[in-house]
Image: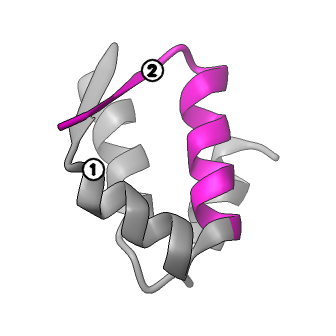
Amino acid sequence: MTTDELLRALRTSRADLAGLIETVMRDRLPYIVIPTQAVQAWREEEPQRWAETAGWLAAHNVALVQV
């Protein structure tokens, strides 16, 4: 799945995962800090979309820091 395809898919999500990807791309971030509660909610409410997002982050060597 390309980044554009992922963004299109994420825009149908209730969570703002597309915004997360866009921020990482725009700012060329090596890591992203996300509250653990947000990650847990995404895993429960949007498991497929979260898996795609986490996979994209890993593929682009963007570390996920949960706080």
Residue at left 43%, top 86%? 14
Residue 66 included in the magenta stretch of the image: yes
Residue at left 45%, top 20%? 62
Image depth: mark 2 or mark 1 in front? 1
Disc 1 residue type (three-letter): Thr
| Magenta-colored span | 48-67
- Report which residue position mark 1 lands on: 36
Viewer-proximal residue among 28 and 43: 43
Query: In this view of the protein, can residue 41 be seen by the observer?
Result: yes
Q: Is residue 15 left or right of residue 59?
A: left
Q: Is residue 2 left or right of residue 55?
A: right
Viewer-proximal residue among 66 and 58: 66
Q: Give the x, y percent position of residue 42.
A: 45, 68
Classify 10 Å Cα crowding around label 2: few (below 14), some (14-19), many (20 and above).
Answer: some
Q: Is residue 28 left or right of residue 5?
A: left
Q: Which mark sits nearer the N-terminus, 2 or 1? A: 1
In the picture as drawn, the residue positioned furthest to the right comes out as 1
In the displayed structure, would residue 7 be above or below residue 56?
A: below
Q: Which is the main secondary structure of the residues drawn in magenta?
A: helix
Disc 1 element: helix
Residue at left 34%, top 34%? 24
Residue at left 57%, top 59%? 50
Q: Give the x, y percent position of residue 38.
A: 29, 62
Disc 2 element: loop
Residue 34 included in the magenta stretch of the image: no
Q: Give the x, y percent position of residue 10.
A: 56, 69
> Could you tell me how far apart the alpha carbons at marks 2 and 1 are, in whole angstroms?
16 Å
Q: Which mark is residue 62?
A: 2
Query: In this view of the protein, can residue 29 be seen by the observer?
Result: no
Q: Is residue 46 left or right of residue 26?
A: right
